[in-house]
Image (cartoon, rainbow, N blue to C red):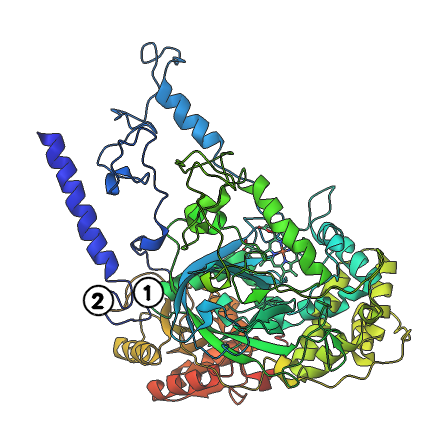
């Protein structure tokens, strides 16, 4: 039977494909050694994760029989309806004759269109745009004295799913906007799911959850025209944060380089609130959670961020997925700052229940307690990244909450929001949300119920089901709330007096930044406030900045052309915390992207030598050339001059002076390309990379490019040499500091 032959052939092809796919997974049997590949090269999909299979869908008649055939995934060789009826055609509606009306009786048409009509679910009200990955967390066993959390014990490996996000933008908005980033981790522990739902900024705009709708309404696009998308640079945001000064600290972090990360892989994560740890003896400690990225904390510069939002709105999403597929597996250490669980719940005068405050690492060091490695991309964006449901109340024995009023509101909100977003109360049954611990919950029915529950007694106490299920005690890993004493008090709508200090910690943050970082903050405030129409809001914001730092205030005021206001409070005393600066340390350069600018006259041997040197340093090499024609059989071109822009490269290597080509306007006239015969697109590429303080390397033959791009060849981080492999090694060294910081403030390119 020819159809059977065809089906067999397809099955063989699928199994071949699976074998090939497996060789992409680092560490899998038969896998090739991890190599950093070209990021945009099309790749085969990764195999599904065995621990995230579809729910058991044995049919209600019990005749499913289990096994792969019963799994409600896509299987079998034939196209079918959702009911499993095989289809002969899916391209034509059923009609009364080829030119006649479509018949209502066409079940396949109605089912296909109806399902399509309902494909979308509401996007998250905040954090709508995200990217996620699977991974594994390995405990170091160093937290045993303070917590009995089983997944932190030495050597215990726990599967995780991590979702990074922007906060303000819609699902289809750009990745590199100025915003806070979400950093939410689901640990599938043996004691149930633990969700650490954090951000890349350690403080929050508000101290009480009741203000969350206010801050979000202010920050989201204006309700009349729904603009601007995914931006804080507009009147309502600045109106709110200038009036509600407890937002000053978080706003300052947003205006710093932390608001525009280089990559999700290069962000810190913070639990923000103070949580409570409980050890095996029942003793408690207060704790703040930190994620420390192995690649260091790095950012874009603002112009890059803006260009990328147009050039490649998926920049962060692509970067994460490409790195994982290329075997450059992102890693973070989980760390804890612990504090005595004293009745005051303060540490060295800092109120630990106030989520607008940090505890500087110099006062309470971050102790590493485990390592997270992201190992696999999601198989399906909707099923996993979109449907994952985090909740700060998903806790495991050994980790408990505090009375931080922001946290209390979150404990309500996250369950509530999933009921609308995921269409009912059974979202815990969606594969990505399923715990890896046994579930015996007595929750029944409801929309999207996937389980076929047995038994007749989903209540307790019962005798009909033999009294099952039973309660667990502490020794059986029950989650028992820590018996924290609650002081006698009257009901009030008030904040504690210690919450009223809104300026000491913003000042602490400002003083902890290096001068380059401070300049970026000044530029960010100036940019954002320039976009605010209402003069009173600009002036009021300057009034807030006057209470943080006179230089910051004066510089922003000068940029806006406004007078500098006087502070309304005495300038707070604050000790800088050097740990808050992103500069000064050395980090691995692996995974960085190096553009090799060549043209058909470039020596192919030289291009190969540079490419190999880049790969040896664990970085990704992209050849940039006038057209897509390969430079040699083994030297494909990854970016034409028409498609290349500086923002996707961390550094450039120039091989020769590319002759003028056809630019975007079709001009071939060398004279129109600047002072020398250099392609104007290359001049722009190099000029931008230079102004963004990226390391530049070049063959002496590329001298004319420096001139055309307004590059000072003597400037720090501009390396010229015949030995390009050595130039690449020095570039990698410079990338350890992320950028050539000595090159800021950026020289302005003048015509
Ligand atoms: Fe969230 N937040 N949040 N938030 N949040 C949501 O939950 C909320 C806050 C954070 O990748 C929502 O499932 C309230 C702080 C992340 O799926 C919602 C308050 C921090 C994510 C919600 C806060 C966060 C969310 C929207 C003030 C850092 C994305 C969709 C009390 C510690 C998780 C959803 C993901 C998502 C409510 C404040 C982090 C509406 C009421 C502080 C990373 O439930």
The C terminus is located in which quarter?
bottom right
Q: Position of residue 14 (x, y in %)?
A: 21, 47
User: Is residue 549 left or right of 441 when viewed as pictured?
Assistant: right
Q: Which mark is residue 389?
A: none
Q: Which mark is residue 637?
A: 1
Q: Nearer the viewer, residue 15 or 109?
A: 15
**SS at badge 1:** loop
Residue 545 image-quadrant placement: bottom right
Q: Is residue 599 above or below residue 433?
A: below
Q: Position of residue 470 (x, y in %)?
A: 46, 49
Q: Tell me, yes or no, if residue 679 can be seen here.
A: no
Ligand 1, image quadrant it occupies? bottom right
Q: Position of residue 152 (x, y in %)?
A: 46, 71
User: Is residue 411 left or right of 25 when viewed as pictured?
Assistant: right
Q: Kindly give the residue lying farthest to the front in the view shown.
A: 463
Q: Which residue corresponds to the image point at 81% horizontal and 62% vertical from the top-left?
A: 488
Q: Nearer the viewer, residue 313 or 674?
A: 313
The N terminus is located in which quarter?
top left
Q: Is residue 696 above or below residue 97?
A: below
Q: Position of residue 590 (x, y in %)?
A: 40, 77
How crowded pointer 2 is (Cα within 10 Å; few <14, some 14-19, many 20+) is rated as: few
Q: Which residue is mark 2?
A: 633
Q: Nearer the viewer, residue 246 or 419?
A: 419
**SS at badge 2:** loop
């Amino acid at each position: 039977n020819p159809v059977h032959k065809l089906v067999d052939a397809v099955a063989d092809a699928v199994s071949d494909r699976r074998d090939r796919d497996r060789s992409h997974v680092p560490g899998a049997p038969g896998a090739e050694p991890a190599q950093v590949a070209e990021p945009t090269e099309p790749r085969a999909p990764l195999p599904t994760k065995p621990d995230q299979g579809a729910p058991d869908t044995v049919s209600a008649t019990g005749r499913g029989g289990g096994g792969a055939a019963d799994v409600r995934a896509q299987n079998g060789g034939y196209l079918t309806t959702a009911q499993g009826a095989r289809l002969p055609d899916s391209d034509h509606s059923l009609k009364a004759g080829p030119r006649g009306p479509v018949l209502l009786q066409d079940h396949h048409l109605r089912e296909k269109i109806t399902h399509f009509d309902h494909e979308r679910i509401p996007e998250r009200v905040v954090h709508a745009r995200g990217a996620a990955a699977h991974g594994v967390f390995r405990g170091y066993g160093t937290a045993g004295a303070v917590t009995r959390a089983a997944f932190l014990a030495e050597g215990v490996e726990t599967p995780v799913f991590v979702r990074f996000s922007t906060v303000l933008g819609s699902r289809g908005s750009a990745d590199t906007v100025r915003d806070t980033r979400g950093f939410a981790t689901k640990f599938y522990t043996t004691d149930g799911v633990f969700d650490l739902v954090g951000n890349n900024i350690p403080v929050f705009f508000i101290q009480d959850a009741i203000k969350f709708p206010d801050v979000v309404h202010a920050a989201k696009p204006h309700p009349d025209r729904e603009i601007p998308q995914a931006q804080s640079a507009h009147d309502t945001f600045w109106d709110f944060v200038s009036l509600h000064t407890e937002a000053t600290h978080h706003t300052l972090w947003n205006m710093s380089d932390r608001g525009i990360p280089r990559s999700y892989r290069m962000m810190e994560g913070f639990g923000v609130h103070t949580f409570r740890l409980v050890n095996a003896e029942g003793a408690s400690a207060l704790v703040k959670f930190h994620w420390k990225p192995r690649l260091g904390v790095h950012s874009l510069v603002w112009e890059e961020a803006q260009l990328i939002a147009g050039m490649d709105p998926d920049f962060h999403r692509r970067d994460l997925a490409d790195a994982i597929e290329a075997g450059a597996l992102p890693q973070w250490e989980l760390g804890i700052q612990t504090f005595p669980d004293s009745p005051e719940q303060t540490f060295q005068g800092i109120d630990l229940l106030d989520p607008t405050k940090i505890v500087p690492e110099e006062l309470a060091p971050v102790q590493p307690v485990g390592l997270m490695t992201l190992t696999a991309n999601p198989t399906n964006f909707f099923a996993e990244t979109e449907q994952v449901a985090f909740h700060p109340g998903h806790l495991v024995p050994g980790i408990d909450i505090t009375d931080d009023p922001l946290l209390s509101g979150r404990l309500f909100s996250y369950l509530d929001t999933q009921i609308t977003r995921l269409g009912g109360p059974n979202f815990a049954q969606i594969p990505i949300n399923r715990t890896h611990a046994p579930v015996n919950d007595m929750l029944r029915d409801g929309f999207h119920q996937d389980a076929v529950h047995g038994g007749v007694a989903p209540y307790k106490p019962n005798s009909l089901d033999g009294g099952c299920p039973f309660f667990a005690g502490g020794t059986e890993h029950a989650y028992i709330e820590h018996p924290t004493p609650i002081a006698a008090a009257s009901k009030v709508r008030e904040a504690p007096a210690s919450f009223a200090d809104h300026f000491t910690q913003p000042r602490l943050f400002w003083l902890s930044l290096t001068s380059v970082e401070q300049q970026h903050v000044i530029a960010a405030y100036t940019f954002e406030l320039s976009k605010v129409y209402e003069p009173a809001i600009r002036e009021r914001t300057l009034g807030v900045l006057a209470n943080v730092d006179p230089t910051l205030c004066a510089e922003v005021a000068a940029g806006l052309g406004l007078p500098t206001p006087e502070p309304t409070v005495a300038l707070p005393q604050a000790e800088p915390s050097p740990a808050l600066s992103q500069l000064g340390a050395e980090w691995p350069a692996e995974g960085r992207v190096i553009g090799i600018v060549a043209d058909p006259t470039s020596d192919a041997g030289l291009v190969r030598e540079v490419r190999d040197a880049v790969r040896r340093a664990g970085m990704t090499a992209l050849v940039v050339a006038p057209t897509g024609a390969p430079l040699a059989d083994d030297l494909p071109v990854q970016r034409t001059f028409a498609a290349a822009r500086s923002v996707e490269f961390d550094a450039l290597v120039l091989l020769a002076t590319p002759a003028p080509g056809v630019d975007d306007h079709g001009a071939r006239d060398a004279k129109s390309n600047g002072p020398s015969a250099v392609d104007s697109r290359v001049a722009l590429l190099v000029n931008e990379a230079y102004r963004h303080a990226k390391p530049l390397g070049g063959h002496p033959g590329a001298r004319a490019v420096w001139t055309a791009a307004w590059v000072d060849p003597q400037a720090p981080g501009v390396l010229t040499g015949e030995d390009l492999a050595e130039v690449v090694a020095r570039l990698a060294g410079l990338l350890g500091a992320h950028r050539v910081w000595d090159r800021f403030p950026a020289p302005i390119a003048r015509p």
